[in-house]
């Protein structure tokens, strides 16, 4: 925590223990095959809805009130961890299947809550995923990062992963503590998703408009 009491926060969904254990059984055998990757630990696996950065105490109180309202409006949704991919030459991830449009709508609602608290949020489409590893090699002498070949093989190894279905039933406000070693994550608050299912789910498209889809 900083001197003014601010915390580095994000909002996320957290897979249940059985989904985490299943993914761990798939990941553990391949971890030792690839040098140059910094693997995340199972205790830190989550689906980020919005990264908030440093948030001061007064703002956090307002944010918690607004996130509680978001959770009250959105129902639980069924998801599963599946497939794999990479963000350029930086990050290896596992994707999701299930009610992805509904989850995108939840991410939009979370970002709107943050915006109403004057918390700056990156304006880009939500991509549901769990981060598994990052390329750890330092920059070369020319100041450039190594190419993404380090992630091609592990992404291929995990491409066929298709996990058990689970219910995303709680919204988590999480504190991220960084320093020496892997980041540590601690729940600041959680809320059950208790909204009533609707036949229409609205989500923001890439150009910022909203679109509707029957479920």
Image: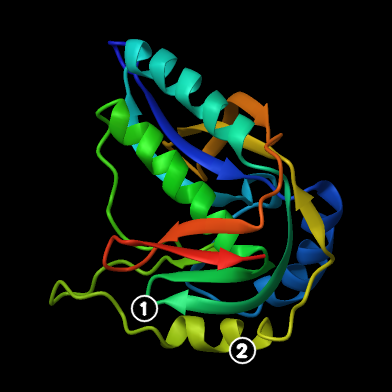
Q: Name the residue under label 2.
A: 156
Mark 1 neighbour class, 10 Å CA radius: few under 14, some 14 to 19, many 20 or more: few
* Spot occupied by residue 123 in the image (x, y as percentages of width and height): 27, 54
Query: Which residue is pictured at 55% across the width and 69% down the height?
Result: 93
Q: Is residue 158 left or right of residue 109?
A: right
Query: Which residue is pictured at 45% across the width and 40% down the height?
Result: 110
* Spot occupied by residue 18 in the image (x, y as percentages of width and height): 86, 54
In the picture, the quarter occupied by the N terminus is top left
Residue 162 got which mark? none
Q: Nearer the viewer, residue 198 or 27?
A: 198
Visible in this render: residue 192? yes
Residue 88 got which mark? 1
Q: Quadrant of residue 120?
A: top left
* Spot occupied by residue 136 in the image (x, y as percentages of width and height): 42, 65
In the picture, the quarter occupied by the C terminus is bottom right
Visible in this render: residue 130? no
Tag 1 or tag 2, which sits nearer the N-term? 1
Label 2 and label 1: CA atoms lie apart by: 14 Å
Q: How many labels does the image show?
A: 2
Q: Which of 149 and 74 is in front in this view?
A: 74
Q: Tell me if residue 113 comes above or below residue 159 in the rendering.
A: above
* Spot occupied by residue 40 in the image (x, y as percentages of width and height): 58, 55
SS type, badge 1: loop
Q: Tell me if residue 203 comes above or below residue 37 in the rendering.
A: above
Q: In this view, does 156 lie to the left or right of 21?
A: left
Q: Nearer the viewer, residue 34 or 56?
A: 56
SS type, badge 2: helix
Q: Tell me if residue 134 comes above or below residue 82 in the rendering.
A: above
Query: Which residue is pictured at 67% across the width and 86% down the height?
Result: 157
């Amino acid at each position: 925590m900083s001197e003014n009491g601010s915390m580095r926060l994000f909002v996320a969904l957290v897979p249940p223990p059985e989904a985490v254990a299943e993914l761990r059984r798939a990941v553990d055998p391949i971890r030792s095959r690839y040098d140059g990757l910094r693997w995340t630990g199972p205790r830190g696996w989550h689906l980020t809805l919005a990264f908030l950065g440093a948030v001061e105490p007064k703002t956090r109180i307002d944010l918690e009130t607004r996130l509680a309202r978001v959770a009250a409006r959105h129902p639980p949704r069924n998801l599963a961890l599946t497939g794999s991919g990479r963000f350029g030459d930086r990050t290896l991830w596992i994707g999701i299947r299930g009610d992805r449009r509904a989850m995108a709508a939840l991410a939009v609602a979370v970002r709107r809550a943050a915006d109403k608290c004057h918390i700056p949020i990156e304006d880009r489409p939500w991509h549901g995923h769990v981060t598994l590893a990052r390329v750890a090699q330092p920059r070369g002498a020319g100041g450039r990062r190594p190419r993404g070949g380090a992630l091609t093989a592990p992404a291929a190894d995990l491409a066929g992963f298709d996990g058990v279905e689970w219910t995303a039933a709680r919204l988590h406000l999480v504190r991220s503590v960084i320093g020496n070693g892997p980041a540590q994550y601690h729940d600041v608050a959680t809320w059950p998703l208790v909204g009533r299912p609707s036949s229409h789910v609205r989500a923001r498209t890439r150009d910022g408009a909203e679109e509707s889809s029957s479920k």
